[in-house]
Image (cartoon, grey):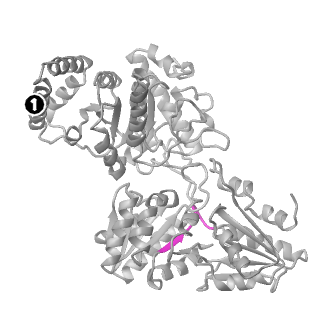
Amino acid sequence: MNYLSKVHSPYDIKKLDNSQLCALAQEIRQVLISTVSENGGHLASNLGAVELTIAIHKVFDSPKDRIVFDVGHQCYTHKLLTGRYESFSTLRKENGLSGFPNPQESEHDTFLNGHSSTSVSTSLGLAAADRIDGKRCYSVAVIGDGSFTGGMVYEALNNGGKTKNRQIIILNDNNMSISDNVGVFSKQLAVLRSKPGYFHLKATAEKAINRIPAVGENISAALFKLKTDVKNKIYDKSNFFEQLGYRYMGPIDGHNIAQLCDALEGAKGINGPVLLHVLTVKGKGYAPAEKSPSKFHGISAFDIDSGSTASHAKTYSDIFGELMCSAAERNNRVCAVTAAMSLGTGLNKFSEKYPDRFFDVGIAEQHAAAFCGGLAKKGKIPVFAVYSTFFQRCYDQILHDIALQGLHAVFAVDRAGFVGEDGETHQGIFDVAFLNGIPGVKVYSPCSFEQMKYDFEKALFTDDTAVVLRYPRGGENKAEYCRGTDSDVYFCGSENADTYIVSYGRVCSAAQQAVHELESSGESIGLIGLNLIKPIPVQAIDTAFGAKRILFFEEGVQSCSTGSLFALELLKRGYKGEFSLTAVPDTFVTHAGVSSLLKKYGLDKESIIKKVKRIE
């Protein structure tokens, strides 16, 4: 029977029994595998959270009870259960469903989120607001064990454990076990403790004890301490969560819907914050994903039968990984730092060849940047490889712990510019804007693999300050001039042109093609390509100043952009010609293909030509 087609809201699954819910889980897995195989996306994490998500919607009443998915990359089942089955084939496509929770799609999506370690804080805020308003509803955070490597989680736990808020944290543990299981007895005890009747009895007993005049609260506290001590002896552990004030439940089999429902019902009976520890298998139900969960965490379209993806040309990440291995071989001061992204940033080979100089600090970008400060202080050359979207998270450490100290640390900023289908939370269009406000930081933005090699060498072995090397997702679109040069600026097209196009990075390829086409039709036009974008090379300003018209094209936000600073330098010199800046306006960029976004924001070859010719 096809249950999924009959689920139009979470209310519809409340009428299904356990066997029907298990059948529903199998249907969902088939839809997930089929859809992601065509559209790409996050597969392994979603396959592991199917039964858990079903149980959550069986027990809680969304949207009255608010469900917050940490990162949000495991929300596909949630989308299917909240009225989006018919449109699920549009997942990650332009004008289709987002790959992350999005309140504009559904009232069941609480936050538009795509970064990790935030759910405990936001769900705690929701619970606090409900308590203030006197509402009897629940705030549920679903967070993976990987996100628990982020320090923000512990800030929130430290705060939340002191409250009486109705917050339930579900720790989806699919990799490492926080607390070791000790034989069959401990597992049976965990199931017993998760029964609703157990928590109802305990809550009733605690309430009665607390009513005893004068000594009730002291007796209750002593009994809780005794219970915790006994349990710690049984589990051979000290329960970190209960020490912070959370009632700990688990571990629970995250693929047993009946057990999950019992545990969640039990958690609802506790008057205060709860942490439910759930054990799941990442990639559950699809053998290739179970075998290689990292590969299927975020994956492009693939063949279902074999699990293989189409072969691809080298990417900037691949080139960066090769450059790092070469640099480490030549200089033993070179160290690599990553925030749980060694595979995505191309550092997997470095980690194998130079394990003593490789540091994966977990999903903790702030710590990673400050850690680099310590390495740099002792004469090492730390290179922190990080996606642009996550680079935002360590702004203060870049400013305070690196730049202010005058330390030489290198930030390899991957996925700079448009990233495409991951959407608003992942577009790498803000890094240049916030870096432009930090004194002393140098920023390179190469236009090709060859240029990246020159800029990489300068960043590591010539510069002596904080340096950023930023590059886009995927491969190069190499233009003729992008053979690589030691210069911070390059030129092509007409000399002493009436019109100059100025750009950097990926857009330079389109700009050069536009210049050649325009020049062949008789236009007096040239291209000023920037390898170094902070500080802006003086020779670039010198060359542009003599032109009648300057058009700057930038794959980033307009506010605080390099283009706006370029215009300011021209203004300081008294420039009287025409200047225009084409960049991303004051908006968040939704998911779509990179080529589509470049065209939408006027940064492809055709748009550049139209701009020069004043064609609207």
In this view, the residue farthest toward the front is: 214
Q: Looking at the image, is 496 positioned above or below residue 136?
A: below
Above or below, 610 relative to 45: below
Disc 1 marks which amino acid? Ala
When asked about the image quadrant of residue 262, the answer is top left
Crowding near the residue tagged with mark 1, few <14, some 14–19, many ≥20 C-alpha atoms within 10 Å: few
Rendered view: 361 above or below 406: above
Q: Magenta span covers which residues?
A: 467-476
Q: Is residue 58 left or right of residue 212?
A: right
For this view, does 361 lie left or right of residue 36? Answer: left
Q: Position of residue 519 (x, y in %)?
A: 85, 77
Q: Would you name the residue on which mark 1 appears?
A: 222
Q: Up-down: is 418 above or below 261?
A: below
Residue under the image location 33 percent in, 65 percent down: 359
Is residue 223 on the magenta stretch?
A: no
Q: Quadrant of residue 428?
A: bottom right
- Left or right of residue 340, residue 75 in this image: right
